[in-house]
Amino acid sequence: MTHAIGPEARIVVGVDGSPTSKAALDWAIRQAARTGDLVEVVTAYYWFPMPIEDIDFKSVATRVSEDAIFGAADPGSPVKVVPKVVNGSPAKALLQEAAGAELLVVGSRGRGAVSEALLGSVSHYCVHHAPCPVVVVRGGRISPR
């Protein structure tokens, strides 16, 4: 793997608020501390075209991202962590954001309906279609700062 130099050297990590996505973020931050990469935290939301009133999906996704970053990022760390909230299906959004990235990091399963699956649908899709190497983090334990 060739390591990019400059502002494009980044690790993209998918975060949906699940324990495995938080563990993926923790892993990505630790990896970025070794490589000097920026960590781009991608949280996708999808508005369903049905009558759901008073739900601001973008605000909910933004809060999920902020909470995960607050729980994983050490304020004294030199690792730059940048949140990015996007509208769209999680798998496609992650692949789009991973273009040009050093790594794409995802949890083994997220908040989907089939939480007992061995590998979630988003992580499975990313493994097979990503434009860069993919790291799938299993488990939900977040190591201490």
Image: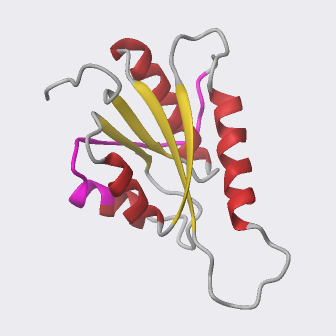
Residue at the image position 62 percent from the left and 24 percent from the top: 73
Determine which quarter of the picture holds residue 6.
top left
Q: In this view, does 54 lie to the left or right of 39?
A: right
Q: In this view, does 68 lie to the left or right of 20?
A: right
Where's residue 61, x and y in %? 67, 56
Is residue 7 something that shows in the picture?
yes
- Is 104 colored magenta in this rendering? no
Is residue 119 something that shows in the picture?
no
Where's residue 138, x and y in %? 45, 43
Colour approach in the figure: secondary structure
Where's residue 31, x and y in %? 39, 22
How many marks are shown on the rendered structure?
0
Q: Quadrant of the C terminus?
A: top right
Determine which quarter of the picture holds residue 135.
top left
For this orientation, the residue located farthest to the left is: 1
Determine which quarter of the picture holds residue 23.
top right
Residue at the image position 50 percent from the left and 68 percent from the top: 88
* Vertical placement of residue 54 versus 122, above or below: below
* Vertical placement of residue 70 versus 13, above or below: above
Residue at the image position 52 percent from the left and 22 percent from the top: 80
- Is 129 colored magenta in this rendering? yes
Where's residue 133, x and y in %? 23, 41
* Vertical placement of residue 1 versus 50, above or below: above
Q: Is residue 108 left or right of residue 71?
A: left
The residue range painted magenta reads 126-143
Q: Is residue 101 left or right of residue 116?
A: left
Q: In which quarter of the image is the N terminus?
A: top left
User: Which of 98 and 74 lies nearest the eye of the viewer?
Assistant: 98
* Vertical placement of residue 103 versus 4, above or below: below
